Image: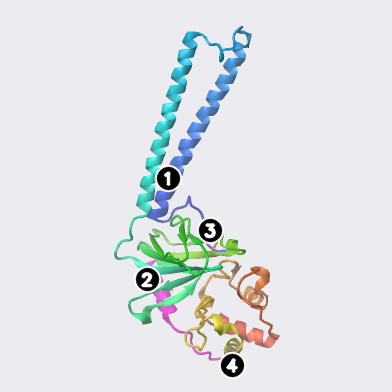
Amino acid sequence: MSGVQSMVGSAGPQAARIESLWWLFFWVCTVVFVLVIIALVVAVYRSRRREGDRLDPLLDPPRDRERRMMRTVGGATAVSAVILIGLLIASVSTGRAVLSLPPPDALSIDVVGHQWWWEIQYNDPVPSRSFRTANEIHIPVGRPVRIKTRSADVIHSFWVPNLHGKRDLIPGHPSETWLQADRPGVFRGQCAEFCGHQHAKMALVVVAEPPEEFEVWRAFQLRTAPPPTRPLLRRGQEVFLALPCPTCHTIAGTPAGGKTAPDLTHLASRRTLAAGTLPNNRGHLAGWILDPQTAKPGNKMPAVALESGDLQALLAYLESLR
Ligand code: CUA
């Protein structure tokens, strides 16, 4: 599918802090592990050499050896405590840094978790500049983005590892966080809290792009779907409106205004179908419409029986929604 997903490839300040903490833990724990193994090997080797001794050195050690053992164990305990306190301080300070409030000039995006897809709302004080999309967030590079999260049903968790840590979406408890991309890229995210049968197929992508490209994308998303011009597209729209599709889906500029499923006004501009489950191309779109329960069992999309002419017209219409 599209996009990288890695927490050790940070593309923004929040993820960079988390990644630094991760590497600190990794190296400290690696060094401690190696030292412990070396000490163990040395101890085993030495006790072998002492096997000839008459007395058990652990149960009945000579005075000087006992003192040395006490010093070693005491020293190792003190070093362990210092290391653990150091890691605790690093962890708490990283936590405080990544939980800071978003800067006031941040772009604001609402993310709503659904079983099993992401509703994305770009809200603007001017209502005509607001729009909805699904499973694909575009952000301008270099600008902080406030992510306001909420859930429509159960607990989900918003996680785009290259940009930030996890943020739980708890029903009835709207929350917010912020992130920023410092370089362009397509970053894959994943629901990180088990939320039912298709939890694993609840992905999204964040497309970080230069501000000019972001503005072009935003201007495009604000447009309503153009009226179909060719007869095939007109037939496709008729098929769409005659089926149960408009009950759940919106296509701005048409009577379809359902809000319980992804907004399809610019479906063809998106990279994936079904929340990162399938690449967005004609074959998968056809398969998804005819039999959505095979690709993603348990999702709320019903199968639609269509004769082939209607299907081809519907596909052509949906592919025209750029
Ligand atoms: Cu949504 Cu797991």
Q: Is residue 82 above or below residue 70?
A: below
**Residue beneath disc 2:** 212
**Residue beneath disc 3:** 193
Q: Identify which residue is drawn at 37% across, 68% down.
A: 108
The colouring scheme, among rainbow, by chain, secondary structure or one colour, is rainbow
Q: Which mark is residue 156?
A: none
First reached walking from the N terminus: tag 2 or tag 4: 2
Nearer the observer, 280 or 49: 49
First reached walking from the N terminus: tag 3 or tag 4: 3
Q: Residue flagged by tag 3: what amino acid is it?
A: Glu
Camera sees residue 209: no
Q: Where are the magenta residues, as a range?
A: 209-233
**Residue beneath disc 4:** 231
Q: Where residue 130 appears, x then y in whole percent?
A: 39, 77
Q: Is residue 29 magenta?
A: no
Q: Quadrant of ligand 1?
A: bottom right
